[in-house]
Amino acid sequence: MAASHLVAKTTEIAEDEAKRVTVGDQQIAIFNLDGTFYATDDVCTHAYASLSEGYIEDGCVECPLHAGLFDIKTGKAKGVPVVEDIKTFPVRVEGEDIYVEV
Ligand code: FES
C-alpha cells in the first residue's frame, strides 16, 4: 500500500535540478521542473545509472550513462537506447516539505 514519505525540502532542489532520495530500499529521483516537483525511479531501465545525475531539459531527463531520454512527468522512455519506462510517484508539497507516495 502507498504511504507518504517526507523526502526533501523544496529549498534543497533548484529549478531544473534533481536529488536522489531513498525510501525503504528504493532509490527515487526528485525533480524540480519550473518550481513543480516530480518523482521517478532513480535507476535507469537500461543499465545501472542514476537519473538524478542526468541532464534535465524540456521536461525530460537524459541518462548520464548512454543518454537515454525519459519524460519526467510521465516516466515514458523517449529515446534510444531506453525502451522501458521508469516508474513515477505522486508528489505532495506542504510548505517546504516534499512528500512522495510510495
Ligand atoms: Fe541509462 Fe544506458 S543506463 S541509457
Image: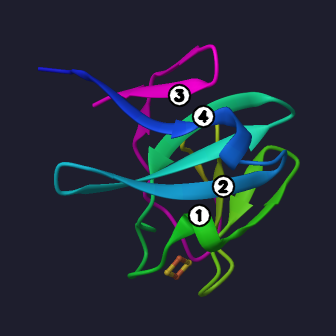
Name the N-terminal-most of marks 1 and 4.
4
* Marks 3 and 2 in Cβ contact (< 8 Å): no
User: Is 34 displayed left or right of 65 in the figure?
Assistant: right
Residue 10 lies in quadrant: top right
CA gap between label 1 and label 3 equals: 16 Å
- Report the residue at 11% width, 20% height from top: 1
Kind of residue indicated by mark 4: Tyr
Mark closer to the chain start, 4 or 2: 2
Which one is in front in this view, the residue at disc 1 or the one at disc 3? 3
Disc count in the image? 4
Residue 94's quadrant in the figure? top right
* Rendered image: mark on residue 18: 2
Range shown magenta: 78-102
Whichever of labels 1 and 3 marks the residue nearer the N terminus, that label is 1
Q: Classify mark 4 as within 8 Å of ligand 1 or not, answering yes or no.
A: no
- Where, by quadrant of the figure, is residue 18 drawn? bottom right
Instruction: Look at mark 1 in the image and give the residue it sits on.
Output: 52
Give the residue at mark 3.
98
Alpha-carbon span between mark 4 and mark 3: 10 Å
Q: Quadrant of the C terminus?
A: top left
Q: Is mark 3 within 8 Å of ligand 1?
A: no
Within 10 angstroms of label 4, few (less than 14), some, or many (20 or more) residues? many
Tell me if residue 28 comes above or below residue 36 in the rendering. Answer: below
Name the kind of residue labelled 1 in the image.
Ser
* Mark 4 to mark 2 CA distance (whole Å): 9 Å
Q: Residue at x 79, y 43 (%)?
A: 59
- Determine the secondary structure under disc 3: strand
